Image: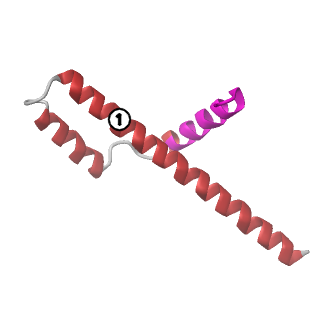
Amino acid sequence: MNTRADKLRNYTIIARLDDAIPLNTEEWVTVERLLNQISEFVPISMLNNVTEAIISYADDQARRGYLLGQEDLVKELKNKAQRIA
C-alpha cells in the first residue's frame, strides 16, 4: 500500500521524467501511426484502453529505470567516499 510519502515520491519522479524525456520521439510517432490505423477497425473505447495501458506501462518502466539509476549512483558515491576515507 502506498503511503502519502510514497505517492509524493512517485509524483516527483514522474514530474522529473516528464521534464527530461521527450514525448515526441520517432518511436512514439510510429506507435501513434499504428494506433491511428487500428482505430479504423476497433472501437475507440478499446483503443483508448490500449493507449492508456501502453502509457502506464511506459511510465512504470521509466520510473523503475530512474530508481535503479539513483540506486547505482548512491552505491558509486558511497564507494568513492570509502576510498577517500
Asked if residue 15 is among those painted magenta in the image, a careful observer would answer yes
Quarter of image, res 36: top left
Name the residue furthest bottom: 83
Residue that extends furthest to the right in the rendered view of this protein: 85
Q: Residue at x 60, y 51 (%)?
A: 67
Q: Residue at x 13, y 30 (%)?
A: 39
* Main SS category, magenta section: helix
Dot 1: within a 10 Å radius of its alpha carbon, few (fewer than 14), some, or many (20 or more) residues?
Answer: few
Considering every residue shown, the one lying at the far front of the view is: 1
Classify the position of the N terminus by image quarter. Answer: top right
* Viewer-proximal residue among 4 and 16: 4
Q: Nearer the viewer, residue 49 or 67?
A: 49
Taking the image as shown, residue 57 lies to the left or right of residue 9, namely left
Q: Is residue 37 above or below residue 49?
A: below
Q: Which residue is at a point 33% across and 43% down the rendered structure image?
A: 24
Q: What colour scheme was applied to this rendering of the protein? A: secondary structure
Q: Amino acid at mark 1?
A: Ala
What is the secondary structure assignment of the residue under circle 1?
Answer: helix
- Relative side of 40 to 49, left or right: left
In the image, residue 53 lies at what x, y percent? 35, 35
Examine the rendered structure and indicate whether residue 75 appears above or below residue 46: below
Residue 8 on image: x %, y %: 66, 31
Q: Position of residue 73 (x, y in %)?
A: 68, 62
Number of labels in the image equals 1
> In which quadrant will I find the C terminus?
bottom right
Which range is magenta?
1-17
Residue 5 magenta-highlighted? yes
User: Residue tagged by mark 1?
Assistant: 53
State the residue at coordinates (8%, 30%).
40
